[in-house]
Image (spheres, rainbow, N blue to C red):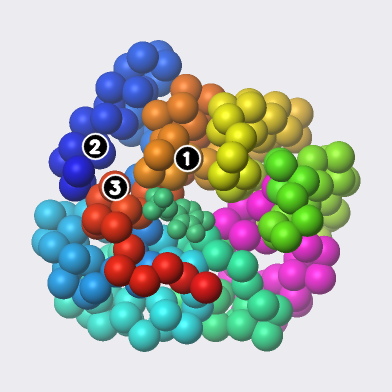
Amino acid sequence: MGLTDIKSRIAKAAKTAGRDAEDITLIAVSKVQPNARVEAVLQEGHRSFGENRVQEAAGKWPDFRETYGDIDLHLIGPLQSNKARQAFELFDVIHTLDRPKLANTFARLAQETGHCPPLFIQVNTGEEPQKAGIAPTDTDAFVKECQSLDLPIQGLMCIPPIEETPSLHFALLQKLARRNGLSGLSMGMSSDFEQAIAFGATHIRVGSAIFGERVTETP
Ligand SMILES: *Cc1c(COP(=O)(O)O)cnc(C)c1O
């Protein structure tokens, strides 16, 4: 466990897949972790982090940025439209564009501010009713809709159903991304990032395997 171990596992998985480890961004998911654990990883020189709540991120990252300089902050949790403006200010990349209404809000904010972070569209690959995301069959049309709004779509993101084989979902996301000419694939967590790398993940989101188990779960 820990950052060094994860990095060597990434290198190994990349090599097995015939890929360059440099093409894989490790997002250290720091949600609900005690600040001391996050600082330890910052002190090791890591600079890409993920949070799933705007409020929580706003509470800690401005200070960390002041102390540690440039940090790439990724939003990986659901975003309410009324927090979109704050998310634009705080995050460098947003992985959870999951509905048409949010796309319209982003387009409006982009016009108004002259800036829009790179975006990933969240796809509900397992078609789970309780989970956010665009249905696989609606993905092609939604990508086009976002592109017609001039949104910078970098790729697709998924969170596979817990009880299913993740590889099937990674393969589906890879197929959808390729078919739409998108290069980014945000997939793979602590328990399955090596499989995600085998299916072309460019952004893996790893929390507990770096920081240890979360003390409290996010609601
Ligand atoms: C919490 C979270 C992760 C990290 O999960 P771990 O199993 O701790 O690696 C990755 N992606 C999303 C969307 C998350 O909410």
Position of 153 with respect to 207 (left or right) is right
Residue occupying the point 42% across, 68% down: 217
Query: What is the three-letter code of the residue carrying label 2?
Result: Lys
Residue receiving disc 1:
188
Residue receiving disc 2:
7
Where residue 162 sits, quadrant-wise, is top right
| Mark 1, secondary structure of its residue | loop
Q: Is mark 3 within 8 Å of ligand 1?
A: yes
Where does the image place residue 15, in percent across and percent down from the top left?
Answer: 33, 17
- Using the image as rendered, state which of residue 105 and residue 194 is in the foreground: 194
Residue occupying the point 75% across, 70% down: 102
Q: Is residue 28 visible?
A: no
Distance between the alpha carbons at the discs numbered 3 and 2: 11 Å
- Magenta segment: does it hold 109? yes
Q: Is residue 135 above or below residue 168?
A: below
The first of marks 1 and 3 along the sequence is 1
Give the extent of the magenta segment: 95-123
Q: Quadrant of the N terminus?
A: top left
